[in-house]
Image (cartoon, rainbow, N blue to C red):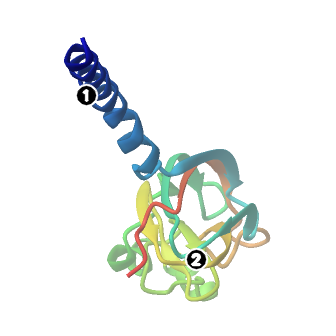
Amino acid sequence: MKHRHVIVATMIFAAVALLSAPFAAAQHAPRPPKKEQRIVRIRGNQGWLNTGIRLLPGDRVTIKATGKVCFSNGEKASCVDPDGWGVRDYAKSWPDNWNYCDDPMRNVNHAALIANVGHPDFLVGRHRTFSGKEGTLYLGINDCTLKGPYYNIGELSVVIVVERNAVPKS
C-alpha cells in the first residue's frame, strides 16, 4: 500500500509539473511593446505642430500620412501628397516660389511632411518608421511660405503609432 501511495504521489507531482510549465514560462516571457496611436491634422499653412508625444530611444515610431497640400497661393497645379514636390524639379517648375526663401530642409521635396525630435529635422513623407530619438515629436510642412506670398492650403491627416520599449537596448 505504501508503495502505491508513492507511485500515485509521483504521478500527481509529474502531472502538476507538466501542466504548470507553460504558465511559468509565460510569466517570464517578454511582454509585447505597449502601443499608442494618435491622429493629427497638419494644415498646409501652419508651422511646426507639437504632437504632444514624448519619445524615448527604445520607442519605435511609425508615421503614415494622407491628404494634399497646395502651395503657391493654393494653385491646383501645385497640390502634392505628403511626399511633396520633387526637389530636383521644384526650382524649374516654380521659380518665383523657389527664389522667395529657403525651405526648412533645402534638399528634401518641397511641401513634404517633415518631422523633428530634437535636431536635425528629417523627412517623413507618406510613410516613415524610426527609433533611437529622444524628445517631443513635432511635424511640419517643408515650406518657408506657409502664409503670405505663395501661401498654402489643404491639410494632411497623420497617424502616429508609438511602440514603447520596442527596440532592445544595445
- For label 1, the crowd category at 10 Å Cα-Cα, with few meaning under 14, some 14 to 19 and many 20 or more, is few
Q: Is residue 135 left or right of residue 88?
A: right
Residue positioned 37% across, 69% down in the render:
86
Name the residue rendered at 36%, 43% in the picture.
25
Q: On screen, 121 above or below 66? A: below
| Outermost front residue | 1
Residue 14's disc is 1
Q: Secondary structure at mark 2?
A: helix
Q: Callout 1, which amino acid?
A: Ala
Residue 42 percent coordinates (x, y): 68, 54
Q: Position of residue 155 (x, y in %)?
A: 65, 49
Q: Is residue 150 above or below residue 19?
A: below
Is residue 58 shown left or right of residue 46?
left
Query: Which one is earlier in the sequence, the residue at label 2 or at label 1?
Result: 1
Q: Residue at x 65, y 48 (%)?
A: 154
- Tag 2: residue type? Asn
Badge 2 vs badge 1, beta-carbon distance below 8 Å: no
The secondary element bearing badge 1 is classed as: helix
Looking at the image, residue 115 lies above or below residue 5: below
| Residue 158 in view, yes or no | no
Residue 34 horizontal/vertical position (percent): 56, 49
Q: Which residue is mark 2?
A: 97
Q: Hey, which quadrant is residue 166 in on the image?
A: bottom left
Q: Which residue: 58% across, 71% down?
A: 115
Give the spatial CA distance, label 2 vs label 1.
78 Å
Residue 87 vs residue 170, the one in the foreground: 170
Q: Nearer the viewer, residue 90 or 135?
A: 135
* Image quadrant in which the N terminus is located: top left
Using the rendered image of the protein, determine whether residue 15 is visible from the camera's viewpoint: yes
Q: Quick one: label 2, few (<14), some, or many (20+) residues within 10 Å?
A: many
Percent coordinates x, y for residue 43 in the rendering: 71, 54
Which circle, 2 or 1, is nearer the viewer? 1
